[in-house]
Amino acid sequence: MDAPATLVITISRQIGAGGAYVGQALSRRLGIRYVDREILQQAAAVLGREEGDLAALEERASSMWDRVASILSLGAPEAPFVPPPVPTFAEDELFAVESEVMREIAAREDAVIVGRAAGWVLTKHPGIRRLFLHAPEEWRAQRIRESYQLPGIEAARSLIHKSDQQRARFVHALIGDDWTAPKGFDLCINTASIGLDASVDILVGVANARRRERPPQT
């Protein structure tokens, strides 16, 4: 008998909506793997990149996944903003490798995967739960200004506009639809309204319900 499908929670998010915070907290609560930047590290190994190339590789991934959203993802809340360097290799090659890395992880173990269009890459995975985190612009701008130590709220708003527009273009090119359309997700949460910790509580319930659906392994 085939093993029951793994539980994979993919988190798509507007910049500043708390994707990294929610993803990390959820993985701790569930005791499952958290996957974010390590996808890029594994892709680097496959592509034969040296460890010292990872910084440039990460920024190149930003231009691929978000069509230069100016940053890879929200990442660690305290991480400073660093503009990306000039790209150095083909986007489609990195997309293919990272997609395969995600499929391999999803096939092996339960995981929370943040960003990198995982919800669309893994859409046919039987154990997937696709989440979208969003929030009003002003709430996101305040978080981004503090997280990236930006000089003012206008700089944060500018970053939001650029990120939203470029993620929209990337996902539309990928699936031909709006990246925020609810039909593309199993659950959409306004983190400003619900709260980050309450959002984690909701997702723990969703994950545990999925676990109860799985037949026990024999």
Image (cartoon, grey):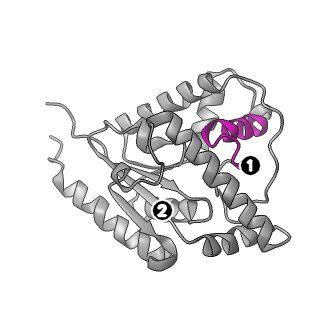
Residue drawn at x 77%, y 73% is 153
Q: Is residue 100 positioned above or below 22 on the image?
A: above
Q: Is mark 2 on a helix, strand or loop?
A: strand
Quadrant into which the C terminus falls = top left
Crowdedness near tag 1: few (<14), some (14–19) or many (≥20) residues, C-alpha within 10 Å: some
* Highlighted range, magenta: 54-71
Say if residue 85 shows up in the picture: yes
Q: Is residue 124 positioned above or below 203 on the image?
A: above
Residue drawn at x 57%, y 38% is 39
Crowdedness near tag 2: few (<14), some (14–19) or many (≥20) residues, C-alpha within 10 Å: many
Residue drawn at x 42%, y 67% is 189
Residue assigned mark 1: 70
Looking at the image, residue 27 sits to the left or right of residue 46; the answer is left
Label located before the other in sequence (2 or 1): 1
Magenta region includes residue 70: yes
Looking at the image, residue 15 sits to the left or right of residue 121; the answer is right
Displayed quadrant of residue 58: top right
Displayed quadrant of residue 54: top right
> Where in the figure is residue 20, as x and y percent of width and height?
57, 59
Quadrant into which the N terminus falls = top left
Magenta region includes residue 90: no
Q: Cα distance, mark 2 to mark 1? A: 19 Å
Q: Is mark 1 on a helix, strand or loop?
A: loop
Depth check, front residue: 41 or 61:
61
| Residue type, label 2 | Leu
> Where in the figure is residue 175, as x and y percent of width and height?
44, 36
